DNA sequence: GCAGGTTCATAGGCATAGCCTATCACGGTC
DNA sequence: GACCGTGATAGGCTATGCCTATGAACCTGC
C-alpha cells in the first residue's frame, strides 16, 4: 500500500467518479482504475460499487477513508513541517559556554545574534569544558564556546577571537606600580580557580607551572576569585572580557609582557549537519569581538 | 514520499543505525541509505547525523517522526480494518421490508438469521415498495424484501417464497359458509389498503379490477384492515403469513379457488458488491419459509 | 603503524510497478 | 440504431526501488 493509493482512494470516494477523480489527481482514468483495483485486491474488500453512472463508496470504504485521510494529512504535515525547518539558521540551537566566558560574553553578543539570526532560538548552557564536550558528543549540545583546542577527530572547531589575559592585583600590591607585568612575577602569590576550569590550567601554565597556587584557597568561580584578589589574598590572571567586572571590584589591571592569553573557539561535531548555523553564530560573535584584544589591553592601562 | 520511506525513516530513527534498521526492514543497507537520502533531498532537511559509529536523528527528524508514526499507524489501521471487513457476510446489512410483510415475517426469520449469519448486523427498514426502491437506488439500503417484480435493469431480484392470499371474512358473512372462495365473489364488499401498498393493487387485480373497493373506507395498515373486517365492514384478501394475526382478531379465513397469491423476492442493486450477503439472507429466509404455502393453506381451513 | 572490522555511500544491473494511449464492453439517450 | 457516457483491459515505456559489489572514512588492537 502506498500513500498515492490512499490519495486515489480519497479522490474517488470524494468525486464518486473515476474520471473526475483521475483529473483531480492529475493521472489518467485507467491508472486510477488499476490502482483502486489493486487496493481492493490487497484489502480483500470491494471499495466502490461501480455502475455506468457512478462509483459509490461501499460501507467498507466509508469506514476506511477516515484512516486514509489521517495517513494522508499526516504525510502532508511531514512535508509542511520539513519545509518550515529547511533553513538551517532556524530552530533551536543549544550552545555550550564555559563559565569564565559566559557572563562576560553573552551580554555582548545576545543582541547581535538576535538581530543577525532572528529565527535561531539560542539556548545557552554554561558548564566546564569537559562537561560541554561530553554533552556535545551526546548530541545534547549543537556547539560550544571553549578556550581549548579541540580534542579528538570527531569534533572540529573554529577560532573566533583571541582574548589576552590581564594581571589582576590588589591596589596595594607592590607590582601595581609597574605599567606592565611579567607573568612569572605573579607566580609567588597567585590565586587560581578550582579544578576543571580551563582558565586555571592556562593561568598555571602562563605563570611557569610551579606557582604557589595560593595555598589552600580555591575559588569556585571567577567572581569569587576577583573578590579574593580585591581583598588582598593574592594576584591572578583574568581573561580580558572580565576586565570591566574586575575594575568594578576595585582591582588593578595590568597588561602582561609575555602576552599570555587564550583563544575562544566554537566547537561542534564534525558530522553536525547544521554547520551553516555554527558558522553564522561564530561569525556574529567574531565580528562583535573584532579588535577586542587591542581595545581591552588599552582600556586596562 | 512513500509510506515505505516513512517506515525506513522510523526504523533508522529507532535503531540509530542504518545496518540494523535495514535488517529490521528486510532490505539491504544501501537501499536504506539511498531512500533516506532521497527523503532528505525531498524535504530539504538533514534527517540523520551520520558518523562512523552511529546515525543520530537530528532535531528536525525528531520533530517529524511523530507525524511519520501517525501516517504509518493510520495505514496499518486501514489494513487491519479491511481485514475485519473482508467477510462479506459481516457488517451492517440494511434490509428494506414492505409493511404487509414485516410484522409477520420478521419474527419468523430473526432468530434463524442471527444463527446462520452471526456477523451480519441486520438493520430492518419498513416502508412501502416505492420508497424502498428509492432508498435502494440511493445506496441507503443494501437489499429489500418486496412482493413485486423488479423494475429497471439496475436492480435484480431473487424469488424467496410464494405466499398465497386467503379470503378474510367477518364470521357472520354469507361466504363464510363455503370452504373455498372464488376471488371474484369477494369483489362486491371488499376492503383494501391505502394507496402505495402493493397488496392493495394485487388484491384489486385478483378480484377482477372493477371491485367496489369499500367506498370511502381506507385502511392505512394491515392490522387496521383486519380490525375493519372483523367489525363487519367488509371482506378482504390477506397474505398467508398474516393468517395468525387475522384469526386472533376473530376473522374467518378461507382458501381461494383461483390460488391468488404473491411471491416475496429479495431485490438489490445489480452492482452491489456484497451479493453473497444478499444470497445468504435470502437463503435463510427461503429455507425458513419452505413449504409455507401448503402449511398456511392447511392451517387456514 | 598497519591490518581488519566497523560505519555509511556509491555504482551498475535488473525486475517491476506505475503510467500513458488506445481500445473494449456495457448502458443510457436521443 | 447511432452515439455519448461510464469503468475495464491491453501493450509498451520509463523510472523507481532493489540487489550485490565496492569504496571511503574511521576505529581498534596487535
Image: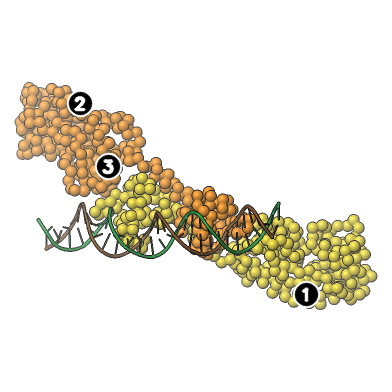
Chain colours: A orange, B yellow, C green, D brown
Q: Nearer the viewer, mark 1 or mark 3?
A: 3
Q: Quadrant of the C terminus of chain A?
A: top left
Q: Which badge, 3 or 2, comes first in the chain's sequence?
A: 2
Disc sitting over residue A275 in the figure: 3
Alpha-carbon span between mark 1 and mark 3: 89 Å
Residue B230, relative to residue D27: is it above or below?
below
Camera-nearest residue between A172 and A56? A56
Q: Position of residue B54 (x, y in %)?
A: 27, 54
Camera-nearest residue between B235 and B268? B268
Classify 10 Å Cα crowding around label 2: few (below 14), some (14-19), many (20 and above). Answer: some
Residue lying at the far right in this picture: please name it.
B174
Disc sitting over residue B293 in the figure: 1
The residue at the point 10 percent across, 33 percent down is A260
- Indicate the secondary structure of the residue bearing disc 1: helix
Marks 3 & 2, CB-CB < 8 Å contact: no
Asked if marks 1 and 2 fall on the same chain, the answer is no
The residue at the point 15 percent across, 26 percent down is A294
Amino acid at each position: 500500500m502506498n500513500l498515492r493509493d490512499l490519495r486515489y482512494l480519497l479522490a474517488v470516494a470524494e468525486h464518486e467518479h473515476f474520471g473526475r477523480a483521475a483529473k483531480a489527481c492529475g493521472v489518467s482514468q485507467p491508472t486510477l482504475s488499476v490502482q483502486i483495483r489493486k487496493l481492493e485486491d490487497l484489502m480483500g474488500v470491494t471499495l466502490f460499487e461501480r455502475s455506468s453512472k457512478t462509483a459509490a463508496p461501499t460501507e467498507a470504504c466509508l469506514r476506511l477513508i477516515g484512516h486514509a485521510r489521517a495517513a494522508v494529512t499526516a504525510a502532508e504535515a511531514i512535508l509542511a513541517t520539513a519545509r518550515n525547518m529547511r533553513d538551517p539558521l532556524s530552530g533551536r540551537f543549544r550552545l555550550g559556554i564555559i563559565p569564565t566566558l559566559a557572563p562576560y560574553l553573552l551580554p555582548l553578543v545576545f543582541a547581535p545574534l538576535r538581530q543577525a539570526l532572528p529565527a535561531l532560538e539560542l539556548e545557552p548552557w554554561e558548564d566546564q569544558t569537559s562537561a560541554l564536550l561530553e554533552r556535545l558528543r551526546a548530541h545534547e549540545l549543537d556547539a560550544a564556546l571553549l578556550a581549548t583546542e579541540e580534542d579528538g577527530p570527531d569534533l572540529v572547531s573554529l577560532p573566533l577571537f583571541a582574548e589576552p589575559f590581564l594581571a589582576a592585583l590588589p591596589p596595594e600590591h607592590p607590582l601595581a606600580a609597574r605599567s606592565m607585568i611579567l607573568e612569572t612575577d605573579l607566580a609567588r602569590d597567585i590565586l587560581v580557580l578550582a579544578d576543571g576550569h580551563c582558565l586555571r590550567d592556562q593561568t598555571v601554565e602562563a605563570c611557569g607551572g610551579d606557582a604557589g597556587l595560593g595555598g589552600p584557597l580555591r575559588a569556585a568561580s571567577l567572581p569569587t576569585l576577583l573578590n579574593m584578589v580585591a581583598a588582598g589574598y593574592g594576584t591572578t590572571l583574568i581573561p580580558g572580557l572580565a576586565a570591566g567586572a574586575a575594575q568594578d571590584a576595585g582591582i588593578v589591571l595590568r597588561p602582561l609582557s609575555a602576552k599570555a592569553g587564550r583563544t575562544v573557539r566554537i566547537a561542534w561535531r564534525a558530522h553536525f549537519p547544521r554547520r551553516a548555523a555554527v558558522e553564522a553564530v561564530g561569525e556574529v560573535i567574531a565580528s562583535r569581538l573584532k579588535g577586542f584584544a587591542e581595545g581591552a589591553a588599552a582600556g586596562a592601562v
